[in-house]
Image: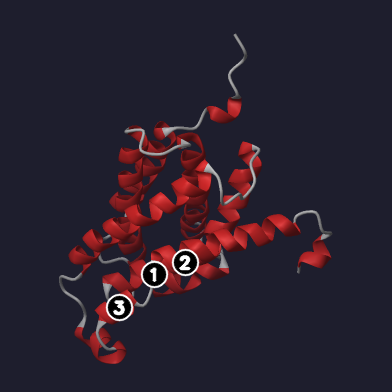
Amino acid sequence: MPAEDSRAAPGPSAIEQVVERMEAIARGLPAQDGVACFNDLYLAVTRAVAVEAGADGFEDVAFLAALDVVFADIYFDAVDADERMERVAHAWKPLFQARARPKVAAIQFALAGLNAHINHDLSLALVETFLQRGLRPDRDSPQHRDYLRVNALLERVQEQVKARFAVGLVGVADAALGRLDDLVAAWSVAHARDAAWTNAEALWALRPLPEPARL
């Protein structure tokens, strides 16, 4: 019998470990904290992914689980850096610097976290996961089809969480920004994730170049 490929190890249990860390973060933060608002959305999405992964809802569960872990670790690095009073990554600064502001709606905090995590972190996580798994960013692949399937899952969960955030929206924020529903509608998870995959393709193509050529 051939030896099992070690790259096939990650699975739904790995996603559950990510869920446990997010649950621990949630327990340590007041509900009104800006990071807690983003963590609430992220936790809901990750739980939903874990359920579908455990139900064989994807073609390459191992890839999805590995990506989930690598992706979440970038967020956890930001949380840990902030707790140590170290500088967080530039993309995360708006959320962590504004997390205690009283006149910011919960949905705004959640969107700030999504913006940092998807628009900046996801392409990096994709490249790292491709390297770990011995794969490449191929759009005609089980990995890309699973990636697109997560888009639909994210849209569903985002709507559910947005309904919870809609309770107690801050009037001042509404006055300054117009209807927050319009702000939320203008930001598309699917479009952001499509851009992240495209950025990952670009980063992948640049890998063989010397470091100065990639700047």
Locate residue 52: give its quadrant.
Answer: top left
Of the image marks 3 and 2, the number of the one nearer the N terminus: 3
Name the amino acid type tagged 2: Ala
Using the rendered image of the protein, determine whether residue 17 is visible from the camera's viewpoint. yes
Q: Give the x, y percent position of residue 203.
A: 68, 59
Depth check, mark 3 against mark 2: the one in front is 2
Q: Which residue is mark 2?
A: 192
Farthest residue, direction left: 167
Q: Secondary structure at mark 1?
A: loop
Q: Give the x, y percent position of residue 5.
A: 60, 23
Between residue 92 and residue 61, name the one nearer to us. Answer: 61
Rendered position, 8 above or below 132: above
Q: Which residue is mark 3?
A: 104
Q: Secondary structure at mark 3?
A: loop
Q: Give the x, y percent position of residue 12.
A: 40, 34
Farthest residue, direction top: 1
Name the amino acid type tagged 3: Val
Between residue 190 and residue 108, name the one nearer to us. Answer: 190
Q: Give the distance between the C-alpha atoms of the residues marked 1 and 2, in whole angstroms.
A: 6 Å
Image quarter where the N terminus lies is: top right
Q: Secondary structure at mark 2?
A: helix
Image quarter where the C terminus lies is: bottom right
Q: Give the distance between the C-alpha atoms of the residues marked 1 and 3, in whole angstroms.
A: 21 Å
Q: Which residue is mark 1?
A: 188
Badge 3: few (under 14), some or many (20 or more) residues near its Cα, within 10 Å?
A: some
Q: Give the x, y percent position of residue 81.
A: 52, 58
Residue at image position (47%, 66%) is: 192
Farthest residue, direction bottom: 175
Position of residue 183 in the picture relative to residue 191 (left or right): left
Name the amino acid type tagged 1: Ser
- Residue contact at pointers 1 and 2, CB within 8 angstroms: yes
